Image (cartoon, helix red, strand yellow):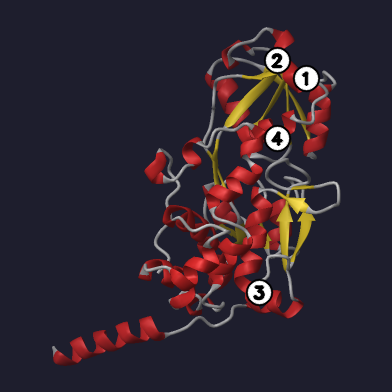
């Protein structure tokens, strides 16, 4: 019995004192000196190039945050714009290191495509947008309508299920590129535009007359969106997952891009100091212990990221509020 207890105690000690060994993905990223991140082909508020060609948005900021955690430098990222059809193949093949592009976490994708979703960065749902001239106030009035949407997305499946469930028919008008879908809808080639509500808000800004369209009240699906990495490399998976969690934890702790460095030095809270680098959480993942400090000081907490990129679209934070403020954003403790 004493031998068994000694063995168990030894095992616990080993588990708590061991440090991560660099995995193939992290080795490759460090060797080339930058993170290759897959993003959308242009979705305002999430991933889109500005007039100078610089990529910005919520999804982009999680690429930048991951680079900050690994290199201590949020600028060490290169971006690969990908269509919905291309995105998962690019990740599984190694063309990109991580995918941070409005992509729904589903069982089929997570378990059969050679990729792993890491965390949810945006809780969304699918909706419908129509021209005000159509005079429609509910999705249940859309029988026989033509519907524009993206090829190779969960949106197609949700659309078919919704119309079948309610005994309605529709004519699908599908395109691979998001801009093609928006252009087709704007030119009148279809009656309805459907995608995630965040996407509708973003793409609505591209219409010739944004105020001439209305979003119908129905939300027909759950769309948890978040970054993914190639399956089989737990170390990069852990880094990306905990980067997301760190932005949420920082907001809850009152740590932001403006006060993070000061709090790392002067906070009276042991939890805050450990979060910002005094603890050894970086060693567990093969990155510097001040990784969370770099993430928050260079990119911001989740609330800052939201306010900068998503709030201007007019979207209510809703489910994406912290759990203690009416939402469901909740991070395991970074300690």
> Which one is closest to the eye, mark 2 or mark 3?
3
Toward the bottom, the furthest residue is 3
Q: Which mark is residue 190?
A: 1
Question: Against 83, is 296 above or below?
Answer: below
Question: Against 323, is 186 above or below?
Answer: above
> Which one is closest to the eye, mark 2 or mark 4?
4
Query: Label 4 belongs to which residue?
Result: 202
Residue at x 74%, y 37% (from the top left corner)? 151
Q: Which mark is residue 71?
A: 3
| Left or right position of 6 against 140 | left
Residues at marks 1 and 2 touching, judged by CB atoms closer than 8 Å: yes
Is 173 or 332 nearer to us in this picture?
332
N-terminal-most mark, 4 or 1: 1
N-terminal-most mark, 1 or 2: 2
User: CA gap, disc 2 to disc 4?
Assistant: 23 Å
| Left or right position of 224 against 153 | left
- Residue 179 horizontal/vertical position (percent): 81, 36
Residues at marks 2 and 4 touching, judged by CB atoms closer than 8 Å: no
Query: Label 2 belongs to which residue?
Result: 145
Residue at x 83%, y 23% (from the top left corner)? 208
- Residue 74 horizontal/vertical position (percent): 68, 65
- Residue 120 horizontal/vertical position (percent): 52, 50
Helix or strand or loop: what does disc 4 sit on?
Answer: helix
Residue at x 54%, y 48% (from the top left corner)? 303
Screen quadrant of the C terminus: bottom left
Q: Which mark is residue 114?
A: none
């Amino acid at each position: 019995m004493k031998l068994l207890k000694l063995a168990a105690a030894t095992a616990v000690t080993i588990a708590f004192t061991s440090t991560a060994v660099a995995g193939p993905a992290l080795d490759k990223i460090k060797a080339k000196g930058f993170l290759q991140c897959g993003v959308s082909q242009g979705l305002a508020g999430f991933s889109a190039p500005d007039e100078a060609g610089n990529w910005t948005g919520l999804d982009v900021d999680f690429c930048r945050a991951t680079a900050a955690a690994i290199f201590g430098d949020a600028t060490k990222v290169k971006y690969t714009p990908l269509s919905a059809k291309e995105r998962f193949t690019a990740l599984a093949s190694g063309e990109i290191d991580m995918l941070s592009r409005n992509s729904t976490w589903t069982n089929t994708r997570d378990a059969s495509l050679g990729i792993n979703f890491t965390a949810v960065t945006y809780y969304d749902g699918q909706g419908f947008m129509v021209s005000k001239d159509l005079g429609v106030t509910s999705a249940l009035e859309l029988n026989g309508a033509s519907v524009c949407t993206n090829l190779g997305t969960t949106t197609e499946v949700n659309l078919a299920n919704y119309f079948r469930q309610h005994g309605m028919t529709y004519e699908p008008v599908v395109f691979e590129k998001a801009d093609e879908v928006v252009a087709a809808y704007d030119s009148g080639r279809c009656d309805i535009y459907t995608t995630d509500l965040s996407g509708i808000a973003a793409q609505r800004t591209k219409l010739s007359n944004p105020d001439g369209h209305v979003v119908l009240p129905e939300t027909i699906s759950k769309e948890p969106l978040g970054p993914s990495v190639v399956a089989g490399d737990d170390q990069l998976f852990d880094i990306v997952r905990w980067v997301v969690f760190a932005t949420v934890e920082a907001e809850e702790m009152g740590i932001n891009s403006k006060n993070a460095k000061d709090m790392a030095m002067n906070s009276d809270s042991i939890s805050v100091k450990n979060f910002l680098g005094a603890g050894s959480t970086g060693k567990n993942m093969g990155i510097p212990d001040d990784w969370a400090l770099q993430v928050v000081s260079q990119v911001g907490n989740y609330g800052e990221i939201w306010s900068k990129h998503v709030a201007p679209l007019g979207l209510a934070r809703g489910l994406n509020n912290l759990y203690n403020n009416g939402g469901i954003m909740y991070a395991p403790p970074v300690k």
